[in-house]
Image (spheres, rainbow, N blue to C red):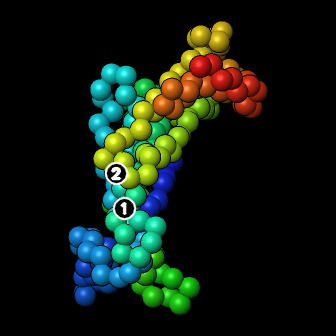
Amino acid sequence: TMDEYFYTDTAAPVDVDPRTGTATEVLPFVRTDKWCVHVDVDVTDVHVPGRNASAILRPACGIGDYRGGDGLGVLHGLSVADAHARFVYDGLVTSVDRWLRSHWIRKRRVRFASERPVGPEGDVRAFLLAPSAGGARHTVPHVRLGDCSEEVGCERSERGPFDCACIEACVGTKLSQIVISGGVITDIYGVG
């Protein structure tokens, strides 16, 4: 399988096992400072017909001191080779900073995974981050990704989707098609 990784910032405290020094649990985020950098992640179920795999990113802090989160972002994903590819929330990933302070850098990791192995023919994947309108913290923007390869005349070949593929992206009321030929994006059409 082939996975793509996405990271968001978190300022949530970490509980560290004193015997091993490893992070054992992410504690709930509680804002204590004027400024903060923290994003909560929710992964949606993709086994609903007509829906893409998606991860909802909700900032806990807005632009400005002590301001709540402004809107949200939705990360959508599509795999041409595997219609059941999905986002998986892996939780917290920590690392040392440049001064070697352990668990100082904290990120929440989301990965786009598929159950099918990717062979030498490859896969075409598309990702789209769509923001909500400012102040619309609970309104998810209308976005849909789709495979339009048959509509533009692409035939499946043993060389795989890199030979010819089409990704359709609908954001709000705007529909676009991106055509890939020979592994290169050759055309981007505004359809409607």
- Residue 47, image x and y in percent? 30, 29
The residue shown at (44%, 46%) is 133
The residue shown at (47%, 37%) is 77
Density class for disc 2 (Cα within 10 Å; few <14, some 14-19, many ≥20) is some
Cα–Cα span, label 1 and label 2: 7 Å
Nearest to the observer: residue 26 or residue 12:
12
Position of residue 56 in the picture relative to residue 182 (left or right) = left
Q: Let me know if residue 152 appears in the view.
A: yes
The residue shown at (31%, 40%) is 44
Residue type marked 2: Arg
Position of residue 126 in the picture relative to residue 181 (left or right) = left
Residue 69: numbered disc: 1
The quadrant in which the C terminus is found is top right
Residue type marked 1: Gly
Q: Are marks 1 and 2 in contact (CB under 8 Å)?
A: yes
- Residue 107, image x and y in percent? 42, 67
Residue beneath disc 2: 137
The residue shown at (26%, 74%) is 30
Q: Secondary structure at mark 1?
A: loop
Q: Secondary structure at mark 2?
A: loop
Residue 19: numbered disc: none
Nearest to the observer: residue 186 or residue 144:
144
- Residue 78, image x and y in percent? 49, 33
Q: Let me know if residue 166 appears in the view.
A: no
- In primary-sequence order, the first of circles 1 and 2 is 1
Position of residue 27 in the picture relative to residue 134 (left or right) = left
Q: Check the image and report above or below for 121 versus 113.
A: above
